[in-house]
Amino acid sequence: MSSKPRYNPLMRIDSESNAWIEALRLARWPAVIIAILVAGWLIIHSALRIGSETALEVVDRTAEAVKGLGAGFTSMTITETFTAAIPTLGTEGMLLELAQLEATETFERRDEKRAFYDLVPLGTTVSEIRVPVTYRYHLRLDDQWKLSVRDGVCRVQAPSIQPTLPPAIHTDGMEKRIEGSWLRFDEHDVMDDLEQSLSLRLSARAKSPRRIDLVREICRTRVTDFVRSWLLAEAQWGQGQIVAVEVVFADEDTGNLEMADTPNG
C-alpha cells in the first residue's frame, strides 16, 4: 500500500524564493541599462546647464564691455568733465602751446619822391630787410571745447589755432639793403620806418590762413596727444574703452565730423 507524500510548507517557500531570485536575475540587466541611461542624462543635463551659465556669463561680460566703452563718459557728460579738469591740465595763462614755424621773411619798401609840383623826379629809395622769424601757435584751454564718445572713439572739436604774438624776430640774423638816388638823403629814414613796421607786418603774416595751414597737422597731433593723456589719467583709455581720438578745430569744416548731442548708446 503506497503512502501519499506529506505536504511540506518549507518546500513551497523554497520554490517561491527560487522564483524571485530568477526574476531578479532576469531583471538586473535592464535595471543596469536604465541606471546607466539615467546617470548619462544627469551628466549631460549638468553639462548643458553649466555650459549655459558659462555662455550667459560671456554674454554678460560682453555686454558690460560694450556698455563700458568710455565708461562714465557719454556725449552729454564728457565735455563737462573735460572742461572741469582744464584748470589742472592747463599751463600758465591757460594756453596750450602747439607748434612753431621757422621762416626767413623778406620785406621791401619803395619810396618815390618828386619836387616842383611833381615835375622833377628826385629818385626812388628801395629798402629791403631779410630776417629770421619764429612763429608760435597755441590754443586757449578756456575757449569752447566739444567732445563726444561713440564706438570707442572720442571726437574732439577744439578751439581755433591762434598765433602767439608778436612773433620772435631774430635780429642777429637780420640783413638790410638800401638802394637810393644821389638826389635823396633820407635813405636811412626809410629803412628805419620799415624796420619799425616789422612787428605789425609779421603779426599779420602769422595770422594768415596759409601759415596756420602749414602747422595745422602738427597742432592736430599735439591736441590728440593732450586729450589722450587726459583720458589715460581718467582711466578711460585702452581696450574695451576709448581707443582713438579724432580732432577738428573750430575754424575747420566740421560737416564730416558728427558731434553727437545725445548720450552714447
Image: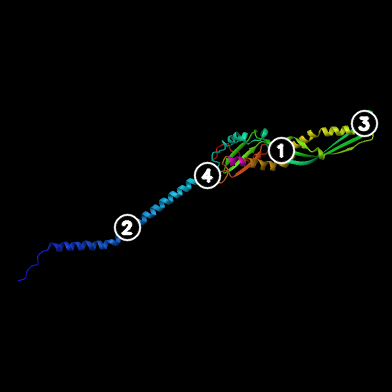
Q: Choose the circle earlier in sequence order: 1 or 3.
A: 3
Q: Choose the circle earlier in sequence order: 3 or 2.
A: 2
> The magenta stretch spans which residues?
229-233
What predominant SS class does the magenta segment belong to? helix
Q: Where, by quadrant of the figure, is residue 249 drawn?
A: top right
Name which residue lies at 72% across and 35% down.
164
Residue 35: numbered disc: 2
The residue wearing badge 4 is 66
Q: Is residue 109 left or right of residue 7?
A: right
Q: Choose the circle earlier in sequence order: 4 or 2.
A: 2
The residue wearing badge 1 is 137
Amino acid type assigned to the residue bearing label 1 in the image: Tyr
Number of the front mark, 3 or 2: 2
Residue 137 visible to an observer of this rendering: yes
Quarter of the image that includes the N terminus = bottom left
Amino acid type assigned to the residue bearing label 2 in the image: Ala
